[in-house]
């Protein structure tokens, strides 16, 4: 009797990287899609994604997570809207504070949207974690962006 050769376990397909190296992850609510997004972030951006996620979780206990439009989104418990998101670009990870104009001090990146402000996190640039956490805490107490 001939025994069939064992087949190697199928490897999950790697997510497609969109322009700028942003992972294409199906939208979904909860921890799993956000962790899939972070795991698919290319190169040094993955460490940034892990750190941003950990800082947000530590600053806002019970934070809710989702992936929408190929980006992780976070909302405070009891809130309907989202207060922060991030997205990969070629040379940086862009953090979006949806009510950033209400933060003190105001994050540096301007937006076409009046309330939104950005923070670009680059590979070799200093990242002020204390300021980031202060912004996250402030942003989580403001009304979120409904999407």
Image: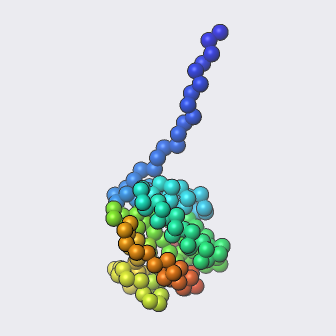
Residue 104 is situated, as x and y percent measured from the top left of the image, at 47, 90
Q: Position of residue 100 (x, y in %)?
A: 45, 83
Q: Nearer the viewer, residue 51 or 37?
A: 51
| Residue at position x 39%, y 53% in the image | 17
Query: Seen in the image, is 56 located left or right of residue 110?
Result: right
With 85 as the anchor, is 19 left or right in this view? left
Give the total number of marks visible in the rendering: 0
Left or right relative to 75: residue 71: left
Q: Does 69 sit above or below residue 110?
A: above
User: Is residue 120 shown above or below 22?
Assistant: below
* Residue 136, image x, y percentages: 53, 80
Query: Can I make out residue 67 in this image?
Result: no
Q: Residue at x 50, y 59 (%)?
A: 38
Q: For this rendering, which residue is in front, 39 or 51?
A: 51
Q: Quadrant of the N terminus?
A: top right
Asked whether residue 38 is in view, the answer is yes
Residue 7 rendering spot, x and y as whole percentages: 56, 27
Task: Tell me how the rendering is colored.
Answer: rainbow
Camera-side residue of 36 and 68: 36
Q: Report the front residue among 22 and 80.
A: 22
Write the residue at 57% across / 34% down: 9
Which quadrant holds residue 69? bottom left
């Amino acid at each position: 009797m001939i025994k069939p050769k064992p087949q190697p376990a199928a490897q999950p397909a790697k997510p497609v990287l969109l322009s700028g190296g942003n992972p294409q992850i199906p939208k979904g609510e909860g921890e799993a899609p956000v962790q899939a997004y972070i795991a698919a972030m290319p190169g040094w951006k993955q460490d940034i994604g892990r750190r941003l996620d950990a800082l947000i979780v530590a600053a806002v206990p019970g934070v809710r997570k989702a992936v929408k439009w190929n980006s992780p989104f976070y909302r405070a418990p009891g809130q309907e809207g989202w207060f922060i998101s991030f997205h990969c670009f070629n040379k940086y990870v862009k953090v979006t504070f949806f009510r950033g104009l209400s933060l003190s001090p105001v994050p540096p990146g301007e937006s076409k949207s009046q309330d939104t402000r950005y923070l670009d996190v680059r590979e070799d640039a200093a990242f002020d974690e204390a300021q980031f956490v202060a912004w996250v805490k402030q942003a989580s107490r403001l009304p979120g962006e409904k999407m």
